Amino acid sequence: MTGSSAAQGPEFDGVALPAPQLAPLTLDTQLRTALSVPQANALLKAFGMVTVSDLLSHYPRDYADREVLRPLNQLTPGANITVIADIISVHEKRMASRPGTIVEVVISDGGGQFTLTFFGKNSQEWRLKQLRPGLRGSFSGKVRMYKGESQLANPAYKTFESEEEEALQDPSLRLRHKPLIPIYAATAAETSWNLQTLIDHVLRRVGHLPDPVPDDLRMQHGLLNHTQAIHWIHSPDNQTEWMAAQETLRFTEAWVLQCALMQRHSLARERRTRARVPTPGGYLERFDAALPFVLTVDQEICAAEIANDMAQSGPMNRLLQGEVGSGKTVVALRAMLAVADSGGQTALLAPTEVLAGQHLRSITTLLGPDLAAELMPTLLTGKLPVAQKRKALLRTVSGQSRIVIGTHALLSDTVTFFDLGLVVIDEQHRFGVDQRETLRLKGAEPPHVLVMTATPIPRTIAMTVFGDLDVSTIRMLPAGRQGITSIVVPLADHPDWFQRIWTKLAEELALGRQGFVVCPAISPVEIEEGLEAEPETGPEEKKIPLANVDTVHERLRDFAPLAGYRIEVLHGRMASDEKDRIMRSFAAGEIDVLVATTVIEVGVDVPNASAMVVLDADRFGVSQLHQLRGRVGRGGVPGLCLLVTNARLGSPARQRIADVAATLDGFVLAELDLALRREGDVLGDLQSGDGSKLRFLRVAVDGDMIAEVRQAAYHLVTGDPGIRTNPALREAIARRLNETERTWLNKG
Ligand code: ADP
Ligand code: MG
């Protein structure tokens, strides 16, 4: 029959063409169309995947060889693993305490053996038929510890024998049983081989995948085309193929990210805003005239870069980085005064209440009484008493206060500015890109944005996380700083040195100076977040409890050489007004020793503080220790930092502390930190400049490639800001932004 019923699909010469839904898939095809709805829903639930692109960019994290077993080491409890192994033995036994049976299957990965346990309410005869000694297969589940051994409880599995049987039903499957099996990050519901099947299905239906990397760049770097790379990453015949695919996809990832950042940078520049320039005889001039010191050369250069940015009609987007005490605040304040000269306001955003309070104090001091009275720097945080908050809000909306300092409460909808000209964000690494965006929208015209960080940022991180910002760096410290001496106190080798620490501290106090004692925990049980993992200790060593604020405080008060000194505590669990009060009296010299957690890490500025004792220093990261140490030696007195540890000589933890003690150069330590820490720890939530996750790109090792790609991205975006000449790239950027949006929504 030659009808053309829509239901049957069109006909041509009597041959049915593929039904419309079998048209080739594109990267943007919804998974609900490409797969069945339940399959699509399962992928959405397990991984947040929506489109074909999401599924295809779920790259294998490993490949297993059917022929060659590979020993599994590193069985971390809680990890979801997939392993190819041989079945060695199978036993079913009754459970002692309740009805049902346990099947115990011992498998071998070629190196060691490993037990799988299956619990069943009834006899598991059927399972014994599937899992026979001698068979090889994939096993997938969560590692748990049982009686000191790691095992998989109720893992999913698939024997190669069952694969053979499936192939008998569908011969096309046999062709696809390649020697390498991709291993995907999986969940209990979505096993690695399920994902493999779905990806395989989609791969057979995608047509040509357009290349986001231009041909010339691809040739120059010897990369595969995108279609080839995607096929080889999921379904390689050999190692050479997947390695070539990884290289191409790593480059592509860097390329798309850098183009996205460059484009954002250039779009931000294109927005119109008001230039903010100082007026003759205005606030800035008066401030400069009264400044009791001369700016360092670096401060001058950074100040000029900022002034130049703010004199443009496009908004500034600049990162100001410099060591603790390098004088960033003065530089930022000068920018605030230029804005005040133009009639505008500045919002200064700090990561904690303590820091916001301190910024208020140091800015008020720097301004001096006259300027402070005129500019009315105001604190606006979530924890202010209602009446005070109302007053602060009023000063902000009326424009009376030219400098408003606060925590993220400044981001809330109730805060309105009269004329927001500049946003200064202190310690950017704690703020997400989206928060930066929220603040930006608070001005009638986009405000200029200055991000300050005291954590020296390794070059690659600057390019990825802050790739949309221009960077100014203060490398030198103001002259006259006395420096800091850092000493490792290894208690593992010299337990008796513990007493000496406190004698040393007492000596510093006797000179009229102040000190910090930093502990990783607040009380015997409460541990502050973000610490390093516990160092390896041999079974012969007894566990030494973590140094904590409460216990240390108690013991120091009873310690004779410290008798008569005022010792107080400071930690994150205290009420903010209490913290503020303590900080204030420490700054005023009414407290001699602060026993604290890392709340004192950033920004606390007490020039008279000369000594710091860090207990269990191995529990802090390299950059964290460096930041902590920066709290002392800030004034005219030399600093002393004792890094106390129980870690043994030769352990990585001990080496880390020795490295920190060996240099005061924060940029060197930042690079070291990057090399030592796991990627995610360094990047935290930010991951990359636009908040989506990095796949193959490793900022610790791919620096040179990223720099090169950034250069190429700069050229492309400068010549073609809308990326009109490369639709595939434009779409790849859009997909990346979509993914970012979803990431943030999921967090929400
Ligand atoms: P940062 O914000 O980078 O940690 P600050 O701006 O708070 O550093 O400066 C630290 C201390 O050094 C402050 O007391 C500040 O007044 C002082 N200071 C800043 N710049 C100079 C300079 N060029 N010469 C001398 N002292 C300076
Ligand atoms: Mg500061």
Image: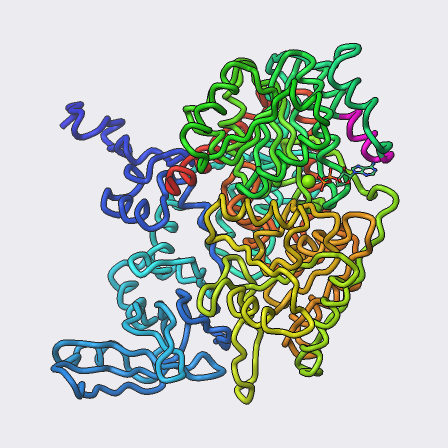
Q: Which residues are magenta?
A: 296-305
Among the 4 quarters of the image, the one containing residue 638: bottom right
Is 40 left or right of 391, judged from the image as shown? left
Name the one closer to the observer, 152 or 523.
523
- The residue lying at 67 percent from left, 78 percent from top is 491
- Residue 551, visible in the rendered structure: yes
Residue 239 on image: x %, y %: 57, 61
**Is 693 rendered above or below residue 681?**
above
Name the one closer to the observer, 699 or 287.
287
Is 297 contained in the magenta span? yes
**Is 662 rendered above or below residue 394?**
below
Residue 121 on image: x %, y %: 13, 76
Q: Quadrant of the N terminus?
A: top left
Residue 170 on image: x %, y %: 27, 58
- Residue 674, visible in the rendered structure: no
Quadrant field for ligand 2: top right
Labels in figure, total: 0
Is 714 left or right of 136, judged from the image as shown? right
Is 733 left or right of 481, judged from the image as shown? left
Name the one closer to the observer, 744 or 295.
295
Is 183 contained in the magenta span? no
Q: Quadrant of the C terminus?
A: top left
- The residue lying at 61 percent from left, 26 percent from top is 377
In the rendered image, the residue lying farthest to the front is 564
Name the one closer to the observer, 654 or 546.
546
Among the 4 quarters of the image, the one containing residue 308: top right
